[in-house]
Image: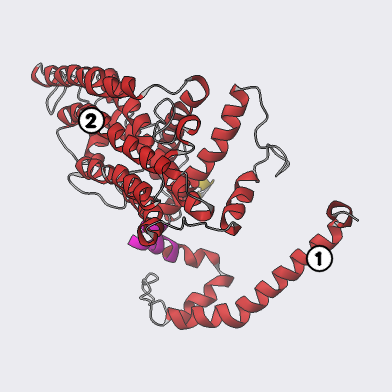
Amino acid sequence: MSYTESFRFGEFIGSVLWLVFWILIIFSLVGLPLLFVVLFYVPLPPLGDEPLTPYLFLTMVADPTRTIPIVKYMIHTDLFRVAAFPGFTYAALFAAVTIFVERKFLAKMQLRYGPLYVGKIEGWLQLIADGLKLISKEIIVPSGADKPIFWAAPIAFVSTAAAVTALIPVAPGWVVANVDVGLLAVFAILGFFPLIALLFSWASNSKYPFIGGLRALHQIIAFEIPFIISALSVVILAGTLNLTGIVDAQISSYWYIFFLPISAFVFYISSLAELERIPFDLPEAESEIVAGWITETSGMIYGLIQLGSYLKTYALAALFVVLFLGGWAGPVIFPQEIIPGYTGEKIYNPVTLSAIVWFTLKTFGVILLMLLPRGISPRIRIDILLHTGWYKLIVLSFINMFVALALIYGGILGPEGLLVR
């Protein structure tokens, strides 16, 4: 009898219920006592005029409305910002959705179905299946590899991508690290990616990965200068390197993409090169050098590199939104009250929630534009790539920088410009 013939849906439901039963038992016998012990050592916020104690915290299960101050306190902690929103979890969810959307998006463009069977609706569970497959697969390390660097590079790749996302403001006051020179910090962190790729390719002790690593280094060097200059024109108009300040400057005037379309185009093309996406995927180039600098990856080493790549995609798309599309700017689309007669100020801020929604929609739209060339463009030659970065894009980025200077000195934009609202 085959595996499919021996499958019984009733037995599957029974096994799931049995698993849930044991999870509840373990949580009741182990989880709750541990939580109760931890609450004695974690500083708890005051609940109005009443001091919050661990006993009172546990009794809030019966009255969920009393947990609102606790929730508000927790979501404004540094740990929540770093781990959940707008930090790693938010960016990782963006990366996961991007992976699935890319596969379906390209399939529709090429008259295919894409993921279909794992999950009844458009194969939406395929992403989870692939993740479980990567976790369960064996990690094969080449015999002549430099093992410490081989293991550390994928972790460094993900950590570097997460560091970039920490600098992106998602809404007013919602940013992990709001530094005065945020834009410079972004470019400084992005400079580590080609070094990590080169180190990993060298540590693999294989020819094809090393060729891919060298290509990545050449590619990033060629596009780094126009990449920075295109963002410099935004700094000239905004008068600040702080990313939140750049968004505020656009809210008080107009989105910078209307004044700096050439810089936006150069930034978009340079972002594709930074992400090593088609038509600039020469560091991987499956038809030429197998898979480039990730040829020797397997299991979760490959999974970590893919996660880092899509975190980087989110970061650069979000940076494009911040620099050229006004960040979170948009009309308030949520009501002041969740339920008529019940003010929602104690639960949520409609201005902040609207800002998050607008930022998310804009970022997802830019990501779709970054995915589009993969379905319509061939890979270009490396000599054309270098010529494009060193000659054409640099000239274009300088042109729009002079336009930005003209707008400032002409009194059109700036602190007292004609178009400042």
Say which amino acid is labelled 1: Gly
Q: Which mark is residue 231?
A: 2
Say which amino acid is labelled 2: Ala
Quarter that holds the N terminus: bottom right
Scheme of image coloration: secondary structure
Which tag, 1 or 2, sits closer to the chain's start? 1
Going 58% across and 71% down the picture, which residue do you hit?
A: 62
Going 59% across and 22% down the picture, which residue do you hit?
A: 109
Estimate the spatial distance between the alpha carbons at disc 1 and disc 2, rounded to whole Å.
Answer: 57 Å
Q: Is residue 406 magenta?
A: no
Kindly identify which residue carries mark 1. 14
Q: Is residue 74 magenta?
A: yes
Which region of the structure is painted magenta? 70-83
Horizontal and vertical percent position of residue 281? 42, 31
Horizontal and vertical percent position of residue 133? 61, 53
Horizontal and vertical percent position of residue 298? 52, 51
